[in-house]
Image: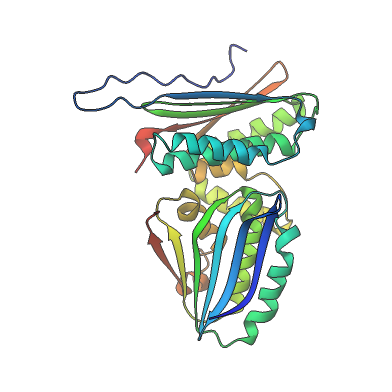
Amino acid sequence: MKVLTFGEIMDGGSTVFSSVTSLDGEQLIVSFKGVVRIDNPYRYLAPYLGALNELLPTYPIKRTSIDFTELRFCNSNGFYIIMDLVEAVYRGTIGPVQVRRVKEDDWQQETLPILLNVDEEEIASRTHFEDVHEI
Amino acid sequence: MSDAPTTDTPSEEVATPNEAPQTVIETSVMIRPLRTIMGDVAGLLGESTMSLMLMFYPPPVCKKANIVISELVTNVLENVCDPDSGFVLKLAIGADLLAISVQNKVPPEVASKVLARVEKIEATADPRRLLAETIRERRQSRLKGGLGLLRLVAENKFTISTVYQDGLLTVQADYRLESLP
């Protein structure tokens, strides 16, 4: 597995949020971990977003997995950056996208589909949700 | 303050045989003045309250409390009108109700905007659709704010109420525990 790029949010010297994008053969794997709470997440994640937009179209990606199961919290200030990151993934890839999310999490069940824009037919046709139970 | 929404004291539940009564938790935090707040107080209050509740309640309920506290306190801290004033956070949970309120000092024009926003949310038949439309509209201009209260209704299934009296705005979020799936 090859890590293509990653982004993180630091708070008080510690990483509170991270996202890693890696390639496993022809599968792209994007993971989100931690909490998004800060006022302006772009301050930390703009370079990561730029890297995704630049890199993904250059790889022969045939399927994608986006994993939200370790994203514990996202306040409403974090909605747009999540939208921008997943939009970069959908735009930069072809093929099916599996979205792993926690079954018992309100945000992941109710709001995440809005942020993914699954109301759009093209997005919906590529997206498959995998609901996992919280450990 | 007689008309202000109060954080309801949960009703005491009578335990049936072989069934433990549901734990009642009530907590209140006041911080003043706002100008001395530098760190992520909203996150700290949300996470610490969730940790306490997790000792007695299932994670989905505790997460709801975390989100409400985070959004309501963040609203206060991102829209400070009087740096010398403070805010009061109240939480009560018992047999059938989770009630969380945040009260702070705001001028009438700010209160009017919040009251109008809550009225619009409460009037909509489909809060989730309103959330989706609002996110898309505001994303075009990268507008900050305006999503927190709507999220609590559309995503977390709370009912929201507000009262403005004597310069103090109280926003209260209630969740009936029997609504849990």
Q: Residue furthest front?
A: A13
Residue B125 drawn at (x, y percent): 48, 42
Q: Pick out the residue farthest to the top.
A: B2
Residue drawn at x 56%, y 49% as measured from the top left: B131
Residue A25, placed above or below residue B76: below
Residue at horizontal 72%, vertical 36%?
B77
Q: What number of labels is visible?
A: 0
Q: Is residue B124 visible?
A: no
Of residue B21 and residue A118, the one placed in the foreground of this image is B21
On screen, residue A50 above or below B64: below
Up the image or down, B60 lies above or below A101; here it is above
| Whole-percent x, y for residue B90 in the image | 56, 25
Locate residue B127 relative to residue B39 in the image: left or right. Answer: left
Residue B83, image x, y percentages: 80, 28
* Image side of residue B176 versus residue B161, left or right: left
Q: Nearer the viewer, residue B75 or B120?
A: B75
Residue at point 76% right, 38% down?
Answer: B38
Name the quadrant containing residue A31: bottom right
Q: Quadrant of residue B161?
A: top right
Residue at x-position 52% and y-position 51%: B129
Q: Residue A48, percent across and down?
A: 69, 69
The C terminus of chain A lies in which quarter of the figure? bottom left
Figure coloring? rainbow
Residue A59 is drawn in which quadrant?
bottom right
Q: Is residue A44 visible?
A: yes
Identify the residue at the far left of this view: B17
Q: Height in image: A115 above or below A128?
A: above
